[in-house]
Amino acid sequence: MTLSCFDLGERMLTVDEAREAILALAVSSLAHETLPLCEAHGRVLAESVVSPIDVPGNTNAAMDGIALQWSSEATSISSWRRVGQLFAGQQYPSPLAADECLGITTGAPMPPGADTVIMIEQLEEHDGRVVIDRPETVKRGQHVRQAGEDIARGQLALAAGTRILAAELGLLASLGFDRVRVIRRPRVALFSTGNEVTAPGTPLPPAGIYDANRFTLQGLVAEHGGEPIDLGILPDDQDVLVDALEKAADQADLIITSGGVSVGEADFTRTALAEVGELDFWRIAIRPGRPLACGTLGAQRVPFLGLPGNPVAVMVTFLELVAPLLSRLQGRDITPLPILSALAEHDMKSRVGRVDYLRGIYRCDDKGQLSVRSTGAQGSGILSSMVMANCLIEISADRKSVTPGEAVTLHPLYRLP
Ligand SMILES: Nc1nc2c(c(=O)[nH]1)N[C@H]1C(S)=C(S)[C@@H](COP(=O)(O)OP(=O)(O)OC[C@H]3O[C@@H](n4cnc5c(N)ncnc54)[C@H](O)[C@@H]3O)O[C@H]1N2
Ligand code: MOO
């Protein structure tokens, strides 16, 4: 297939159109697998989880102190007979009488009939009888956790499609599960392309550049739940590219390359894709990242995304366009990206006709107002701007600049503190 300027694929898509078209590449759903809970971090639940038990299983004490029945006549009782001490893990068999109390520790089940716990700090004890300091402050039912107040038996605990992170791991464990049914991770084949691109750890030729993109992409794929398959660096050679793409289509659920998508004499990604599969479109009104080849490979129609070579363009297009596809491949509903609004701290320039993604640093002042500044130089080769940034500043295609104090949209970046 030869490309001509009259092909539909030559049209420049808006960012929203491109995101929709890229999402539409996810046609098949991935298989499910059962994993031990300790290996499930970051995975996506394949099936909804309904709680088989009440959590907590018993109505229990929330404080160390005494358990008793706080009835209307309780205020007329001046001291209480302590009948014993109950620790977490033990049960007390018989009901307490009106003037009896039971020493209890946090987490121990309430004895039959008792409804209230009084903290140890509020008690004095003489000869086996307990006196309550300031009894007028006691409220019936205080410091008691009800059975099933976290999750009740039969209640939906986690919906299919939930990403299992620390809180979900703990919740599943609290229900007694030691295994969980999850969706297989999408396998994402990664190539860098370009004669100048050199593997780190090897000598750099005079006009060479170390390969950054394969490594940012490995990180991004893993952070978004995929399994990266590193297929190395390809030269600017159409035949080599065609061969490599064909082989990758047999082992991956998604193939991502970087470089060689523009209009230079050595840009072969689009023509190679057109030879092994179908090129759907390759121009998006986004900055950085305008040239981005999107299509499918082989008879299996494996989604293919040829990202531009510039390292910042790789990261921005991944976060804005590829990450939703990875979510969809994992069976997750696509929710809009987290968005905040902040006031610009200074002038920002933009290009009318393309959505600009500047690298930004946002902060919150002492009145709770968010403001944002750019990280400085915004060239799409300046990868240090991504290291400094805690957000992308989105400037819509109709704005040519932003003045100080104007509101802009932010996409916070995922970063561990
Ligand atoms: N005449 C035009 N030239 C360019 C256009 C255009 O519209 N007309 N678009 C520019 C834009 S915007 C971008 S983005 C780049 C994208 O082009 P390619 O995808 O063909 O990228 P390359 O030329 O292969 O590389 C661009 C740049 O990035 C460096 N690079 C490539 N791979 C890596 C890697 N793995 N790690 C680190 N750096 C990498 C490469 O050396 C180049 O400096 O095209 C513009 N040109
Ligand atoms: O669109 Mo390019 O990605 O500006 O560098």
Image (tube, grey):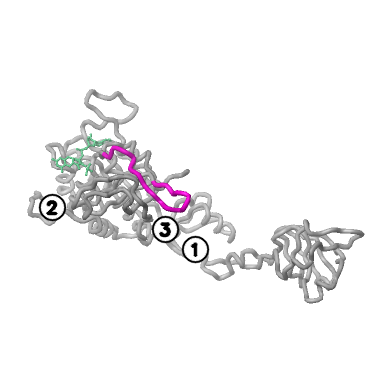
Does residue 375 appear to the left or right of 265 in the view shown? right
Q: Is residue 360 above or below residue 89?
A: above
- Report the residue that reaches farthest toward the right: 127
Mark sitting on residue 10:
2
Magenta stretch contains residue 369: yes
Name the kind of residue labelled 2 in the image. Answer: Glu
Where does label 1 land, which residue? 158
Residue 191, image x, y percentages? 27, 40
Marks 1 and 2 sit apart, C-alpha to C-alpha, by 44 Å
SS of the residue under disc 1? strand
Name the kind of residue labelled 1 in the image. Answer: Leu
Give yes or no for contact between labels 1 and 3 (Cβ–Cβ under 8 Å): no
Residue 100, image x, y percentages? 84, 68
Residue at (66, 68) in percent of width and height: 146
Residue 66, image x, y percentages? 78, 62
SS of the residue under disc 2? helix
Mark before the other along the chain sequence, 1 or 2: 2
Does residue 408 appear to the left or right of 126 in the view shown? left
Where does label 3 land, which residue? 32
Marks 1 and 3 sit apart, C-alpha to C-alpha, by 17 Å
Q: Is residue 281 visible?
A: yes
